[in-house]
Amino acid sequence: QVRLVESGGGLVQAGGSMRLSCAASGRTFSSYAMGWFRQAPGKEREFVAAISYSGGSSNYANSLKGRFTISRDNAKSTAYLQMNSLKPEDTAVYYCAADYLGLGYPRQDDYDFWGQGTQVTVSS
């Protein structure tokens, strides 16, 4: 079992930046690919970014490339999502997820464990 706890969400003005953290506990963090997903009100949950268990590769939703950056610190068992130039349409609940020996693919079904989510609100 892997427990994931997101933090760092809140309210930010459009154009601002925010960094989300996902702290993992329970099993060897370095064995899990980490993904970030988001769900806006009235919409389905969608892929944001993911990083392989080795940290050697990462994937991003096409619409977010260049603004969002995913990273991981295996020594701290924590994954991060740096979000820059935020827009009101980035408002959503952001979830992190873990995929055992994953390569950082965007398929939600690949992910075995999920956090509870953190709210990000971008005001215009």
Image (cartoon, rainbow, N blue to C red):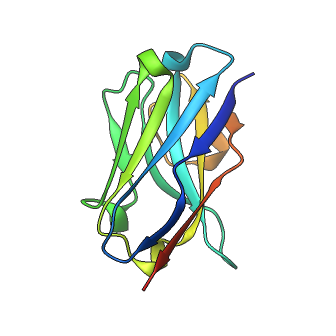
* Percent x, y of residue 59: 37, 46
Q: Is residue 73 left or right of residue 5?
A: left
What residue lies at 47% left-to-right and 42% top-to-bottom?
105
Does residue 102 appear anywhere in the picture? no
Please tell me which residue is depicted at 66% across the width and 52% down the height of the picture: 117
Q: Is residue 52 left or right of residue 4?
A: left
Residue 78 drawn at (x, y percent): 49, 29
Residue, far left: 66
101 relative position to 54: left or right: right
Asked if residue 58 is positioned above or below residue 9 in the image, the reply reads above
Q: Nearer the viewer, residue 54 or 120?
A: 120
| Horizontal arrangement in the rendering, residue 12 relative to residue 44 (left or right) | left
From the viewer's perspective, is residue 38 above or below residue 26?
below
Residue at 50% in and 48% down: 106
The quarter of the image holding the C terminus is bottom left
In the foreground, 36 or 116: 116
Is residue 15 at least partly visible in the picture?
yes
Q: Position of residue 31 (x, y in %)?
A: 52, 17
Location of residue 52 with respect to 95 vertically, above or below:
above
Q: Nearer the viewer, residue 21 or 52?
A: 21
Residue pictured at 67% horizontal, 76% vertical: 41
Against 26, residue 51 (above or below) is: below
The part of the image, by quadrant, that contains residue 10 is: bottom right
Q: Position of residue 43 (x, y in %)?
A: 65, 75
Q: Quadrant of the N terminus?
A: top right
